[in-house]
Amino acid sequence: MTDAHYGVRMFNKILIANRGEIAVRIIRACKEMGIRTLAVYSQADREALHTRFADGAICIGPARSADSYLNITSIISSMEVADAEAVHPGYGFLAENAGFAEACEKCGIKFIGPTSALMRLMGNKVQAKKTAEELGIPVLPWSNKGVADEKEAHEVSKKIGFPLLIKAAAGGGGRGMKLVHTQAALSSAFNMARMEALSAFGDGEIFIERFCELPRHIEIQVMADEHGNVIHLGERECSIQRRHQKILEESPSTAVDAKLRQKMGEAAVKLCKGIGYTNAGTVEFLLDKNKSFYFMEMNTRIQVEHPVTELVTGTDLLKEQIRVAAGHKLELRQKDVRFKGHSIECRINAEDPKTFVPSPGKITELITPGGPGVRLDSAIYCGYTVPPYYDNLLAKLIVHAETREDAIARMTRALEEFHIAGIKTNIPLHLKIMKDHDFIAGNTDIDFLSRFT
Amino acid sequence: MTDAHYGVRMFNKILIANRGEIAVRIIRACKEMGIRTLAVYSQADREALHTRFADGAICIGPARSADSYLNITSIISSMEVADAEAVHPGYGFLAENAGFAEACEKCGIKFIGPTSALMRLMGNKVQAKKTAEELGIPVLPWSNKGVADEKEAHEVSKKIGFPLLIKAAAGGGGRGMKLVHTQAALSSAFNMARMEALSAFGDGEIFIERFCELPRHIEIQVMADEHGNVIHLGERECSIQRRHQKILEESPSTAVDAKLRQKMGEAAVKLCKGIGYTNAGTVEFLLDKNKSFYFMEMNTRIQVEHPVTELVTGTDLLKEQIRVAAGHKLELRQKDVRFKGHSIECRINAEDPKTFVPSPGKITELITPGGPGVRLDSAIYCGYTVPPYYDNLLAKLIVHAETREDAIARMTRALEEFHIAGIKTNIPLHLKIMKDHDFIAGNTDIDFLSRFT
Amino acid sequence: MDIKDIKALYKFLRDTDIVEIDIEEEKGKLRIKRGCVLPREEAAYAAPVTAPSPAKTVVEAAPAKPDNVMVVTSPMVGTFYRSASPEASPFVEMGGIVKNGQTLCIIEAMKLMNEVESEYAGRIVSILVENGQPVEYGEPLFHVEASK
Amino acid sequence: MDIKDIKALYKFLRDTDIVEIDIEEEKGKLRIKRGCVLPREEAAYAAPVTAPSPAKTVVEAAPAKPDNVMVVTSPMVGTFYRSASPEASPFVEMGGIVKNGQTLCIIEAMKLMNEVESEYAGRIVSILVENGQPVEYGEPLFHVEASK
C-alpha cells in the first residue's frame, strides 16, 4: 500500500504495543492513515478501549505487565502471527527498551522510534550528557564520567561545590537521585545511591552534577527523518510535577520567548544531528532563574504531553512518527513551523486529589467535556472498570485558545464539566491549580506543586 | 463588569432561552468569558446538561414547548427575577420570533441577535427578497411582490415560465413550498399553498419564483457589530438535506473557489450593510450548475452548523455574538479572515437510520469519539433519557483537518468510535455517506440524500 | 462545612430574600439555591438545599406530608406576593381557612399581577415561600389541609 | 446477514486457517475473528464469533462443557502445531489417552518450539485449534476428560 500523500510505501498493519489512552491515540492515527491496527492486551484489558477500537486484538498474557505488556516474546510472536509490519511502542512499557527495539530489528519488524543503538546511547545518562557536552550543548557542571567510589566523589565535589546531585546513569525521570548539601553527607549518600541504582536498574553506575535551585523543566520536541532532516517544534513547560511525575503541561512556556525558543530548539536539533537521531524525541532542559538552560536527558519516544505541541503547531506527531518510520521525508521544514495560540494539558488520574492514593474501580457516571477548543484523549467510558495493575492516567484533557488567559478559562470550564463518579480523580486538584495566583501569573517551577498542596 | 479583552462593558448574567446542545454551547462561551449563566428548563429537562451546567436554573413550565421554551412571559419573568441582563435565544424556539425580541427591547433586556425590526424584515420572504433585489443582489426571477390571486399567478407564470415554485412569505427552511410543472396545475397549487400558509403561519401571503434544478445550498456566515462593521466568514455547504433538514455540513464547499467565495461574501455583506444588520446572521444562496448564485433568505440567528465556520476560520462565533451585543466592535476585519483546512459536521440524531422515525429513550451505553481534530458539541451522557418532546438532535460531531480527504478519514474513524446504545441513531447513515463515491468526489446537491437512501 | 452549618445557613436564608448563595472555601464549594423543588420531592414538605458535587447534601427541613395535605404550586415564573399591595393585609394567614377558588397570593410576572386561587377547601398549614421572593414554575407555595 | 449465515460461515472458517474475516455488504458489516475467548466464557466450549455492533452476535457452537472436562490453554502467543515436524505424526489424537506431563502440542513463538504438556490425565475429547493456526495467550487448545 502507498500513502496517498506521498506515493511512498506505507505500512499495511501496525501492532500497538501499549494500552490506555496512548494506544487509542495510535489507533486513531493509523485509522486516519488507512493502516490496519493490531492491539495486544492483557487478560485485565479485554474491555479496554484499545482492545475494542483496533481492527484486531490478541491477548498476550495475564494482567501483570511483566507477563503481558512487557512480554517481548509474546509481542513479537503476535506480529509474526498476525503479519504486522511495524510496532508502535507508545510511551512507558517497552518504549525505551533497547532490547525490544533490537529484537524487532533482528526479526525484520520496523520499530517506530529510533534505532536500538540510539536508545542505548541516550538511555545511559552519563553517555548522553557526555555526548551533549562534546557537541557544545550547555550542561550543568558534573563529574564528566561515572564516579567509581567515595574518594572520586569527594574529588568531584570540590570542583562542583554543594549542594550537588548524585544520579544513576541508568535512571531517568528523577528516579535514583540524591541531593547532598554537605561534605559530611556525601559518602553515605553516594553509597546509598549506588546500591539503589544497582537494585533498581541492575546498573550501579553513578555520576554527580551541580544542583540547580528551583529550575523550570522545559523540554523541546524534535522530529527527525531517516534522510538527515531534523526540526524542533518548540517547547513544553512541564514544571508542575509531583515526585517527578508531570501532571500539567503547557506550550508555550511563560518563561520562554521567541529568542530563547530558537536557542533551545537549535541546541536540541544540534544534539539530534550530532547523534544521527531519527523519529520523535524530546530533549529535556533545566531552565534556571537567569534563563540559562542545561541539557538534562533525552527521551527517545513520544511523550504523554505531545498534544500540547500538536495544538500550537498544527501538526500530528503520531502520523509523522509513522510516516518517518516508513522512510518518508519530514513534511515540515523548520522555517514552516508556526506557533499559534496557547495549549494546556491536564492529566486526569484515578487518584485521591489530596493523598494521591490510586483509585481504581468502576466508573459509574461519566460526563466528558466538549465544545470548542477542547480535545480529550481518553481510554475510559461509562461502565468501564479501571484495572489496578497499570498506571492511573485515565484521560488527558487538552485545550487550545488564542491566549494563555483564554486557555486557562477554557480549561477551567472543561474541568468543571468533567464528571466522573465511582472512582476518585485529581480533577479538583487541577481546578485548584487553574485558580492559583502563581499559576495564573505563570510563576511555576518544579517545586510549584509541593508549595501548593 | 468589564471584559478584560476590551475594557468595554460586558454582561453580568445571560439567560439561555434554549435547551440541548446549543444551550450547552452558549453556557460554555459565557463561562469562558466570565459571565454568569441562567438556564431555563421544562419539567422534562431537569436532568438535561444545560440545566446541570448553568450557574443557575429556573423551571419555566411543563414539557410541552409552547408552555415552556416558547413561553415568553415565563422567560422574561425569569430574567427579571434572576436579574439577567441579556438573553441568548440559540436557534429554533424563540430565536426568530420578532415578538420575543420586541418584548425584550421593551423590558430593557438585551436580545443577543438583531433588532425585532430586522427580524421582521428578513422574516417576511417577500420583503427580504425585494430588499436583496433592490440592493443589486442576484435573485431568481420571481413575482416581485406577493401574488394576490390565481389570475395574478397566471400572469406571473407567463413571465417566469415553468417549472416554478410557489412559496409562503412567512415560510422558510422549505416549509410551505409547492413545485408546479404545468399551467394546468397552477391554480389548484396556488390555492392549496395559500391555505396551507394561512393555517401554518397565520399569514396567507404567497409569492412565486423560478425553480432551480438540482442546486447546491450554500450559505454565507456574516457577523456585524453595532458600529456599522460587517464581515463574512466564508461559506458552508449544506446540500445534504432530508426534507429540507440539513444533516451534514462542511466548509469550504467543493463548488466554491476563492473568487466565488469573495463574490458571494461581498453580496452577503452588501445585504447586511444595506439593512443595517447587527450580530450573527446567515445569508442563504442557491448555487446552480453554472456557478450562478441567487439569494434565497436570511437567517437572523446563529445556525446549528456554525462550528464548521469556527474551525476553518479560528473564530468563536458565540463569543463574538455576545461581545457585539454588549456594544463591542468586531475583533476581525475582513482582510484578517483566513480560511484554514477543512471541516465537516455530522448531526447525530436520535432516529432510525433507515426510516428516520425518532428514537427517544434512555442512553444505556455511550462511548464518545475524541483525539486530535475532533470536536463534540453534545447534550447527552450515559444514563440520560432523551425526552420525546423536542427535536432529535443529540450531538454534533465536527472534525477539522488539513484537507477534505483527511477530514473524511477523520470523520469516518470518529463515527466508528461513536457508540450509543439504548436508542437508535443516524450514525450508520453518516458512515455510509462518508464511504459514498459521490460524496468523496464532492458531487452533492440538494437531492443527494434522496438518491442515496 | 458540615450539615449543621448548612442548616444554620439555610435558616438564615429563609428569613431573607436571598435566592442563591455561592460559597467558595479552601475546603470546597457550596452553592445553595432556593425555590427549586424536584417533582419527585414535592411531597417532601421542604425546599431542597443542595451543595453541588463532590458532596451532595439534601436537607429535609420537615417530616413527610400527610395524604390529606394538598400542595398549591406556582403556575408561572415570577415574584410571589402575599398581599395585593405593600399596605394591604395578606390574602391568607397560617392556620386560616380557605375556600375553593379563594385567592391565596399574587405572582407578578412581567409587571402583571396574577392571582393564584386555591383549588382546595381547607386550612393553610404551611406557607412555603416568603413575601417578595421569586418562584419558578411548579414550585410549591402553600400546603392546604383539605377539609373532610 | 442472519444467524444461519453466520453459523455456516463459522463452520467453514473452523476448517480453515483463516483467523479473521471482514465482510462488508450493503446491509452491514460483519467481522469474525477467531481465537479470542473471554475468560468468563472459557467454559463455554466454543470460540466466540462476533459481528461488531450494531448487531452483536455470539454463536455458540457446542453444548456446555461437563465438570470433569478440563481445558488446556495456550501459555503464550504463537503458532499451534500438533506434531514435532511436518512429517511426524501428531502428539495426540482425538479420543487418545494422555498422562499428566505428556506433550500435547507445540507452540512456536519467535522461531522457538515450546512444548505444551498436559496437566491432567485423561482422554482428549476436543482439539480446538487446527494445525498451523495462530493462538493467543489463554486460548483453549484441548479438552481433556479427566480420568476418575
Image: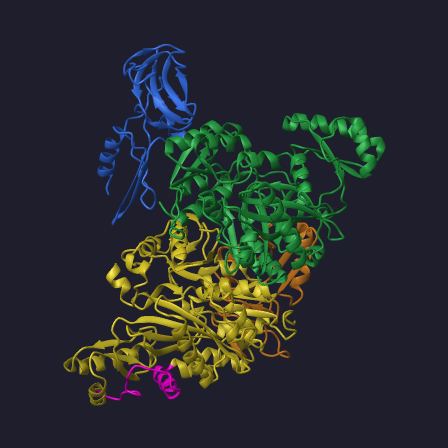
Chain colours: A green, B yellow, C orange, D blue
Residue B145, magenta (yes or no): yes
Residue nearer the viewer, B218 or B103: B218
Describe residue B56's horizontal placement relative to residue C120 as left or right: right
Q: Bounds of the magenta span?
A: B124-150
Q: Residue at x 39, y 59 (%)?
A: B404
Q: Quadrant of residue D133?
A: top left
Q: Quadrant of residue B400?
A: bottom left
Residue A94 percent coordinates (x, y) = 53, 34
Q: Quadrant of residue D63?
A: top left
Residue D124 visible, this angle: yes
Describe residue B113's horizontal placement relative to residue D89 as left or right: right
Q: Residue at x 72, y 27 (%)?
A: A194
Q: Residue at x 51, y 67 (%)?
A: B315
Residue nearer the viewer, A100 or B243: A100
Residue A381 visible, this angle: no
Q: Residue furthest left?
A: B184
Residue A214 percent coordinates (x, y) = 75, 47
In which quadrant will I find the N terminus of chain A?
top left
Residue B127 percent coordinates (x, y) = 37, 85
